[in-house]
Image: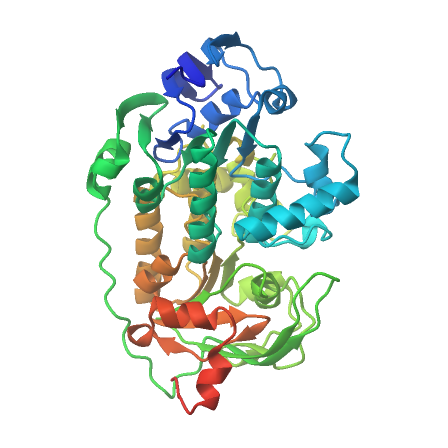
Amino acid sequence: MKPRLELSGISKQYPAVKANDGVSLSVSPGQIHAVLGENGAGKSTLMKIIYGAVQPDAGEIRWNGQALALKSPAEARALGISMVYQHFSLFDTLTAAENVWLGLDKTLSLAEVIARIRKLAQSYGLEVDPMRPVHTLSVGERQRVEIVRALLGRPQLLILDEPTSVLTPQAVEKLFATLRLLAGEGCSILYISHKLDEIRALCDHCTVMRAGKVTGELDPRASSNAELSRLMIGSEPPPLRAAPAAAARKSELPALALRRLSLAKSQAFGTTLVDLELELRSGEILGVAGVSGNGQQELMAALSGEDPRGEAGSVQLFGQDIARSSARKRRHLGLHFVPEERLGRGAVPDLSLAQNTLLTRTESVGRWGWIRLGQVQHLAESLIARFNVRAGGAGAAARSLSGGNLQKFIVGREISAAPKVLIIAQPTWGVDVGAAAQIRAELLKLRDSGCAVLVLSEELDELFEISDRLVVMAQGRLSPVLPIAQANRELVGEWMSGLWQAGQQGGARYV
């Protein structure tokens, strides 16, 4: 069968790194083709070249046998190429429907687009409210908007860059069913993911990249996770040894406590928090599971200090009332946090890595506001080295890093501050298997040093791997807390729909 897409000798040089070095790749109609590689291997750059967002320095692209020189994503979409970016390309001030409308045939009215979004979202199990402004959406909800927008274009080639990073297992299964249906209709799919189980379950061909070059091609269905890991990073990630946390003393003061925290939603499409009760103790990891958009954003804002509207005493740090305290004061008291959104919240895109350390690390700022630039530079360099961040040095702009490398830098910035309490959302979103193992090991090491760690994640496997106790968030409420030994995927899945109240009414007790 004639290939739909052929790449020959594609190269792209940036000032600090050669992102692609003579890459060749071929995708047939109806093929689900994985592109696998560690963070910084050049996968996203290659996809942007195919989509017309980046121009190659050398090489040839052929589309249905014809030579092609794409100058823009608009040209790519006109040919039938759609892409879902790892870092979203949505306008915050527009609604979901308006964002989708921008990339579609202008003969369609906005009302027609809204109707199509609702029909497609219902058919594929991708819950999307087309009328909501994007700035009110969680990361998971924005991901759904991107996927719906790509599917509405009826693509011949669909490029998906980490599409399931913030989707629930149920939503992933529905997405896979959709992708198999599209492939059966002849659509070619390029699929980037660090989740090896997903690649083996979904894809029928795999191209492996390392340091900008293709290192191998294989059928992932006939390969093990260990084999794929060795091809991708040169070795298997070290096994995670998650010893149980030392038992917390009942008399010990909670490191972080919520006492009937209730907050009315701050904007029309937000989630109201209702009577949240929670205790997090030093030396434990408490995992928070839940479907994106059920109050996780609001909870993070209330804990971090971004939303200081809580009633007096509703948020406590080692017994001290911090409900109305600023984020800066909370950091001074030892509470650090990592937001789910890397660019724009965790880091300023156009600032250097060194400058981005100053967002939360002020030890380099003198008494009168003078910044010790040498200390700032040294801190950034130490984070790059310790967390194996692939970047063009401490002066590299945050936006120049791959998503996984930026995540490692932001997580490292907060962990290295030696916090007493760390709140972290989606810790390994878009991070390769080696880096994910490193981040999880660092969180366990932090716990074992006596830090209290609260992890909000939609990766159930991750929560089961590192948590000592687990709680579920649904509809702005928190479930009873479960010791991890009593938790299972079926029970957590039920609770993610808010069904724990029925269990309580039936006489069940959870401690």
Q: Residue 28: x, y in percent?
A: 40, 22
The front one of 265 and 253 is 265
Looking at the rendering, which quadrant does residue 326 occupy? Answer: bottom right
Can residue 330 be seen by looking at this rendering? Answer: yes
* Quarter of the figure with the N terminus: top left
Residue 476 in the figure: left or right of residue 19? right
Looking at the rendering, which quadrant does residue 82 occupy? Answer: top right
The front one of 294 and 362 is 294
State how many labels appear.
0
Q: Residue 249: x, y in percent?
A: 33, 84
Q: Residue 383: x, y in percent?
A: 41, 43
Residue 364 in the figure: left or right of residue 503? right
Residue lying at the far bottom of the rendered structure: 507
The front one of 185 and 175 is 185
* Quarter of the figure with the C terminus: bottom left
Q: Residue 289: x, y in percent?
A: 45, 65
Say which residue appears at 33% left-offset and 27% top-offset.
209
Can residue 378 be seen by looking at this rendering? Answer: no
Residue 25 in the figure: left or right of residue 323? left
Say which residue appears at 32% left-offset and 44% top-offset.
201
- Please, which colouring scheme is shown? rainbow
Above-or-below relation of 135 to 406: below
Looking at the rendering, which quadrant does residue 31 occupy? Answer: top left
